[in-house]
Amino acid sequence: DVKVTQSSRYLVKRTGEKVFLECVQDMDHENMFWYRQDPGLGLRLIYFSYDVKMKEKGDIPEGYSVSREKKERFSLILESASTNQTSMYLCASSRGRGNNEQFFGPGTRLTVL
Amino acid sequence: KQEVTQIPAALSVPEGENLVLNCSFTDSAIYNLQWFRQDPGKGLTSLLLIQSSQREQTSGRLNASLDKSSGRSTLYIAASQPGDSATYLCAVPSLLNEKLTFGTGTRLTIIP
């Protein structure tokens, strides 16, 4: 079974702090994704990566950056957290090369005070 | 731009009934469609992926159908159980890359 893990289930940070959210997958997948999910807005793609050191902006990249130094790990970085970044953050991965079935991690509920 | 719609937004049915969840998409040039369930406060669990060349895909009590020409997919749940209560989402990939466009989901409640 594909396993996608996220570093924290719940996180509380203060405005202006730098925040790192980590995601690891164990199935040698090429593609990795970061989404945020908010009531009434559904899932929105922040960034995705289709290879090590490669990244592409999703629909709402402002205020976020990402890092993919190793194939299995994809990090989401909030350079200076703001209250409007309070949300559920979901990481996903897919095999790639035409196989786009996505598998999700358990999510991180981030609260920025 | 692909748009994915799920109606109704919420559905309640008595335990034991069969039910159908609907998913509509505007651009029929898709090569597959994926159904997920999400429990409150949790991540998404992949249920079924149905290829555009298939008309149906089955897993246990779940059966997904896909009609590309009409831009519709359905998820049929047989003999519903309280444990089926969750939000169900469908998603379709872009042809240009492997990004998914998600529907807003149907929140299903099975009444014991």
Image (tube, grey):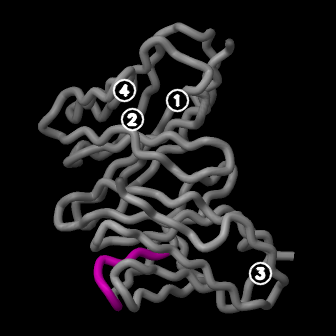
Circle 1 sits on which residue? B7
Q: Secondary structure at mark 1?
A: loop
Which residue carries the number 3 mark?
A82
Marks 3 and 1 on same chain: no
Q: Residue at x 50, y 70 (%)?
A: A34
Q: CA distance from mark 2 to mark 3?
A: 35 Å
Sequence order check: which comes first, mark 2 or mark 1?
Answer: 1
Name the chain letter of the residue that bears numbered label 1.
B
Which residue is at 67% across, 57% downward?
A38
Instruction: Give the residue at mark 4.
Output: B74
Q: Could you say whether the residue bearing mark 3 is in a helix, strand or loop?
A: loop
Type of residue at label 3? Ser
Query: How far apart are labels 3 and 1 at the CA level?
Result: 34 Å
- Residue at x 37% of width, y 25% of height: B62
**Residues under numbered marks 2 and 1 in contact, where contact means CB atoms less than 8 Å apart:** yes
Chain part drawn in magenta = A47-53
Is A98 above or below relative to B64?
A: below
Amino acid beneath label 1: Ile
Image quadrant occupied by the N terminus of chain B: bottom left
Q: Are marks 2 and 3 on the same chain?
A: no
Q: Nearer the viewer, mark 2 or mark 3?
A: 3
Going from N to C along the chain, the mark reached first, 1 or 4, is 1
Asked whether the beta carbons under mark 4 and mark 2 sit within 8 Å of each other, the answer is: no
Horizontal relation, residue B93 to residue A59: left or right: left
The alpha-carbon separation of the residues under discs 1 and 4 comes to 11 Å
Q: Which mark is residue B24?
A: 2
Q: CA distance from mark 3 to mark 4?
A: 39 Å
How many other residues sit within 10 Å of disc 2, few (<14), some (14-19) or many (≥20)? many
